[in-house]
Image (cartoon, rainbow, N blue to C red):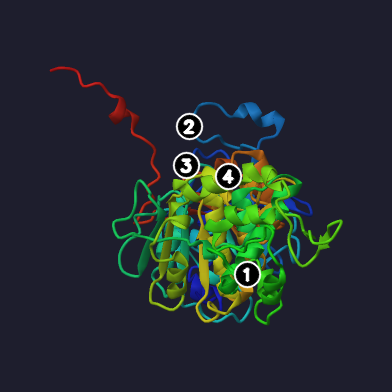
Amino acid sequence: MSRSPNIEETFPRGLLRPELFIGVLSSVSAQAVRFNLNDAGSPSGVHFLGGRYGKGEVGEFVLIEGQTNLLLGRVVEVHLPESERRSVDVSHSKVMGLDAVGTIQLLGSVAMDSLHITAGVESYPRLGDRIYAAPHSFVAELPSLMEPEGSPESKVLLKLGSIDVALESAVSIRPEKLFGRHCAILGTTGGGKSWTTARIIEECMQYKTKIILLDATGEYRGFTGPFIANYHLGKPINKATDSQERSLPPTSFVESDFVALFEPAGKVQGPKMRAAMRSLRLAKLAPVIATKGIIKKIDQSKVAVTTEEQKPGVSEKLDDPSQAFDVKMLVAQIEQECVYPDGKDWTKKPPVSDISRWGGESGDFSYCLSLVSRINAVLISPALACVFKSTDTALTTAIDEFATNDMRLFRICLSGVAYEFKAREIVANVIGRHLLNRARAGAFASSPVVVIVDEAHNFLGRQIGGEDAVARLDAFELIAKEGRKFGLNICLTTQRPRDITEGVLSQMGTLIVHRLTNDRDREVVERACGEIDRSASSFLPNLKPGEAAILGADFPIPLTIQVFPPEAKPKSDGPNYQQCWKIDLPV
């Protein structure tokens, strides 16, 4: 979508149409202007070139004919002076001579020659300057008209929605502006958030896209067909017909993941569990000194263990939190860690300490019994069967293949992973960290990947464990902070923006905001997006279903669109009470 060189080429009949004249300025201030409405008493708007124009209705975009350029604004208030208030009654006929006043929020300046739009006011209008409703086709071009001067023509465009029901007002956005600085899709239940996500995916699928979708509830299972890879973890109730089951082996986990899973408590459990994991890494790296998969320490010599620990290639891996070990041996190894650090040389009279050996059982294992019970419960839990019991192909292997094959959408259904033991949050965090590690290794350098995290408030900003052993599930936060330079961008969808940390939302360059009725959610959006003020956010509670405001660094002028319905509609409907609860009366 390249910017046209002049007004005549893009809008042959011009922007300021006499049919769309609204009124004239009567007051000018630094941030807003007031105007006298020409047709204030008209019972309805007008239709022009297939679109309806309110000619002064709240929310309408307008153009102010300034002295050196055009100003773009939005009507935020219309009112009557107190003396004129009783002039309006239930009659639908035009009230002649109605003295109405409107307030316009100034949004940006429009160059007269190129139509290039810049945020802010280059020169303020004067009293008496004329105001016109902005043509819908012009408002639809705002994303391209805000491009920097000299930007090349865009060949990849995502057609998301329209300013009006008329087709000529369709809004198309470059993926760089949508995902380039990360994206967040926000809105309360029923506002159209899922439909917008599905529409964006469908538009991206028309190109050589690489999208990874973490489907938290399975509502996007309607995406099937060529160029789509469907996978699931666990046993979802509803799954796509072509979905394949995959596992997430413990080798994908790091030390902090196991801390989050097993939640060691107190001053003993955490250190003993970490020591056990270190010993099991050694057993994996040097199996010659292991006995049945563990390192025996109770009344054993330290010599062989110390020798292996100091060997090149082993010592640097022992404290690597990502080094694999056999987690099923963890309980047995914890018992071996509960020993006195030094043994006794009983040939001496009296016995003296022998630092070359470990001593006998210290009694600390009794403090670890609750930890042992939890580890055993986690290992056999159905919620984590995809981790500890499954023999299916690893999901991480399929992700690595996706980076180089012809698939465009990689959907991971997490609806089969239960909330027990915080399994869903931990599994999602493991997937996010794997993506970040692959990105850091350069896997996405030539083919950028967008990871869409559905119901992101369930996965971001989580902190598990007590004060003695805290594990932060921060994989997606790290992607938001550093992923874009490695070709990995994130798109969050959530109905609870207040549950997403402000640090993450502030990294979102583009916000697609549906109806938000909670004032705390709106405050979070205002703080995260410095370009939005209270005048713009005041429209958010009243957006219609499917209507969304696009805000952000690349959209300094907020744009409200009606999102086009997707073809593969999300399966997010609730139960049909009329059908399920009705009583069939005998005929």
Query: Most extreme residue toward the top, as rendered?
Result: 586
> Which amino acid is tagged 3?
Gly
* Vertical arrangement, residue 571 with respect to residue 3, above or below: above
Mark 2 or 4: in front is 4
Q: Earlier in the sequence, mark 1 or mark 2?
A: 2
Mark 1 or 3: in front is 1
Residue at numbered disc 3: 190
Residue 10 appears in view: yes
Q: Earlier in the sequence, mark 1 or mark 3?
A: 3
* Quadrant of the image occupied by residue 511: bottom right
Residue at image coords 41%, 73%: 207
Spatial separation of the CA atoms under disc 3 and disc 2: 34 Å
Mark 3 or 4: in front is 4
Q: Secondary structure at mark 3?
A: loop
Q: Secondary structure at mark 2?
A: loop
Query: Toward the viewer: 433 or 516?
Result: 433
Residue at numbered disc 2: 92
Mark 3 or 2: in front is 3
Residue at numbered disc 1: 282
Query: Toward the viewer: 80 or 297?
Result: 297
Q: Residues within 10 Å of mark 2 (few under 14, many from 20)?
A: few
Q: Is disc 3 in contact with disc 4, using a CB cutoff of under 8 Å?
A: no
* Vertical arrangement, residue 381 with respect to residue 145, above or below: above
Residue at numbered disc 4: 374
> Which amino acid is tagged 2?
His
Q: Secondary structure at mark 1?
A: helix
Left or right: 360, with 2 as reference point: right
Query: Toward the viewer: 78 or 427?
Result: 427
* Quadrant of the image occupied by residue 288: bottom right
